[in-house]
Amino acid sequence: MGKAKKLFNKSILIVLGIFLLPLLTQAQYTNNENIPGQAPTSDLVTYLDNLYNFSIAIAAILAVFMIAVGAFLYIFTSAGNASKIMDAKEMIKNAIIGLVIVLIAFLILFIINPDLVGGTLSGPADVINNVVGD
């Protein structure tokens, strides 16, 4: 009985979310923080798109930085110590795996809908107005 109740509660939350999301997105969004390198905006969809693009760039920069740190540790500080060499290799491997995960996530979103990563996605209120025909 416990699993059925949890499933029912989750389904109620999902249904409420589907019906309440358009009402919540029609409210005016007030931007409190600007994203570096992006123009200030009061549109929530544009803000989230800018935040997504910024986070992809930061993830790529951090991955390259971690690869460089791992290479530095491998070349200069290991001094033949097998455990330090393994640690450096592990750091490089993890940075490459993280970079691949970020790029695959970007690719999957681009395959699903290029508007998701291209900055041309319209908000829920625009979609509802287009469907209703206002």
Image: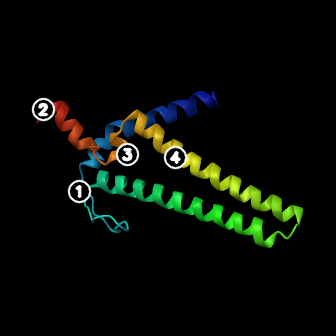
Front-most of residues 30 and 82: 82
Apparent side of residue 134 relative to residue 50 in the rendered image (left or right): left
Q: Are marks 3 and 4 in contact (CB under 8 Å)?
A: no
Q: Earlier in the sequence, mark 1 or mark 3?
A: 1
Q: Nearer the viewer, mark 1 or mark 3?
A: 3
In space, the residues marked 4 and 2 are separated at their CA atoms by 37 Å
- Quadrant of residue 30 within the rendered picture: bottom left
Q: Nearer the viewer, mark 2 or mark 3?
A: 3
Instruction: Please tell me whether mark 4 sits on a helix, a strand or a loop.
Output: helix
Q: Nearer the viewer, mark 4 or mark 2?
A: 4
Apparent side of residue 30 relative to residue 75 in the rendered image (left or right): left
In space, the residues marked 1 and 4 are separated at their CA atoms by 33 Å
Q: Earlier in the sequence, mark 1 or mark 2?
A: 1
Instruction: Please tell me whether mark 3 sits on a helix, a strand or a loop.
Output: helix
- State the residue at coordinates (63%, 52%): 96
In space, the residues marked 1 and 2 are separated at their CA atoms by 21 Å
- Quadrant of residue 1 within the rendered picture: top right
Front-most of residues 53 and 41: 53
- Quadrant of residue 95 within the rendered picture: bottom right
Q: Which mark, by number, is residue 117?
A: 3
Label 4: which residue? Answer: 103
Looking at numbered disc 2 in the image, what kind of residue is underneath it? Gly
Q: Which mark, by number, is residue 133?
A: 2
Label 1: which residue? Answer: 28
Residue count near mark 3 (Cα–Cα under 10 Å), binned few <14, some 14–19, many ≥20? some
